[in-house]
Image: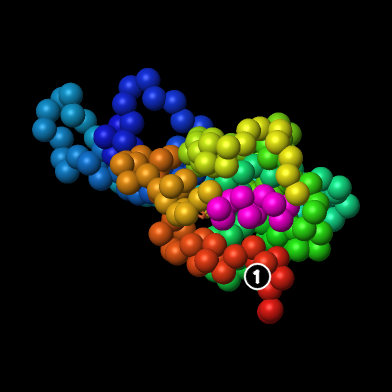
């Protein structure tokens, strides 16, 4: 099992990562684990449950309770209201890039799972609105499945690599946690300092899920919007 899960003794992962994603993905059946194709000796007795289908049923049913959909819906309403009324937006830096990735694709209105659209809209409505760059979960996160509303943190499996993306974005911009810029100036700085999304989001050597390269990295969406410039981003013709 450890080999199939890409783990070694002593590794620690959140229960959600193991039971919700990795075990169902990597070990969909008990073949080769509890189902050994016959008993070769007294030490190799097969478990009587191995062939009953109980494991597969358990995998299908799932044992991790995800966030209550109503809780997420309410979080979407409340956080959008907060963003609409805010004098200052609080955003983790790599989420600026995610806004561009989403907008460079099909995002033309609010998304259910995050508030990327709402931050872009506030930037357009008021290009001088203050944006404070922060580490960790931000105004974009409350409706997300990976957001823990009790602790107000991101505990998604991509959480660690997202923290590195924040640090790398800060470094490219020459900024740090707590810095505040007007929205338009921040978008302009981003386009000026960051030529390619791959500089932040790529990780060709990533061989475990937590470090894999995000699907949008080589899409070219960021680079296209960068080419078009800040004026078009904030004053679209659509
Ligand atoms: S590649 Fe993924 S993490 Fe990077 S900006 Fe796009 S959506 Fe965000
Ligand atoms: S995955 Fe984490 S950082 Fe990204 S939107 Fe969800 S809670 Fe926020």
Q: Is residue 179 visible?
A: yes
Residue 142 image point, x, y percent:
72, 46
User: What residue would you read off at disc 1?
Assistant: 232
Question: Within 8 Å of ligand 1, the CB of disc 1?
Answer: no
Query: Can you say which quadrant of the picture contains the C terminus?
Result: bottom right
Dominant secondary-structure state across the stretch colored magenta: helix
The residue drawn where x is 17% and y is 43% is 37
The answer to whether residue 172 is above or below residue 8 is below
**Relative vertical location of residue 174 with respect to residue 215 in this rendering, above or below:** above
Front in this rendered view, residue 199 or 32: 199
Magenta residue span: 183-192
- Residue 74 appears in the figure: no
Q: Furthest-left residue in view?
A: 40
- Is 187 part of what is drawn in magenta? yes
Identity of the residue furthest to the bottom in this view: 238
Judging depth in this view, the residue of 232 and 154 nearest the camera is 232
Residue at image position (16%, 25%) is 42
Is residue 110 rendered to the left or right of residue 2? Answer: right
Residue 95 vs residue 159, the one in the foreground = 95
Determine whether 236 is above or below 72 in the image: below
Residue at the spot x=33%, y=22% of the render? 9
Q: Position of residue 12 (x, y in %)?
A: 44, 26
Locate the N terminus by quadrant: top left
**Magenta stretch encompasses residue 88:** no
Q: Nearer the viewer, residue 210 or 71?
A: 210
Q: Which image quadrant for residue 38?
A: top left
Q: Estimate the x, y position of residue 229 in percent, counting from the top left.
A: 60, 65
What percent of the width, then of the height, locates residue 65?
61, 43
Is residue 181 toward the left or the right of residue 164 in the image?
Answer: right
Name the residue at 71% across, 70% down: 235
């Amino acid at each position: 099992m450890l080999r199939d899960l890409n783990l070694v003794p002593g590794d620690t992962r959140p229960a959600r990562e193991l039971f919700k994603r990795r075990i169902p993905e990597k070990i969909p059946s008990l073949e080769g684990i509890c189902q050994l194709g016959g008993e070769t000796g007294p030490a190799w007795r097969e478990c009587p449950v191995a062939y009953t289908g109980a494991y597969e049923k358990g995998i299908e049913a799932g044992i991790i309770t995800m966030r209550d959909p109503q809780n997420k819906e309410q979080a979407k309403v409340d956080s959008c209201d907060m963003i609409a009324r805010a004098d200052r937006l609080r955003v983790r830096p790599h989420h600026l890039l995610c806004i561009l990735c989403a907008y460079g694709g099909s995002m033309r209105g609010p998304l259910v799972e995050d508030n990327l659209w709402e931050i872009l809209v506030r930037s357009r409505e008021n290009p001088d609105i203050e944006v404070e760059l922060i580490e960790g979960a931000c105004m974009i996160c409350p409706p997300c499945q990976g957001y823990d509303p009790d602790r107000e943190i991101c505990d998604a499996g991509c959480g660690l690599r997202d923290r590195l993306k924040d640090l790398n974005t800060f470094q490219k911009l020459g900024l740090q946690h707590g810095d505040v810029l007007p929205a338009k100036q921040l978008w302009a700085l981003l386009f000026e300092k960051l030529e390619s999304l791959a500089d932040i989001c790529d990780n060709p050597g990533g061989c475990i899920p937590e470090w894999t390269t995000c699907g949008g990295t080589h899409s070219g969406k960021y680079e296209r919007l960068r080419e078009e410039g800040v004026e078009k981003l904030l004053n679209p013709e659509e």
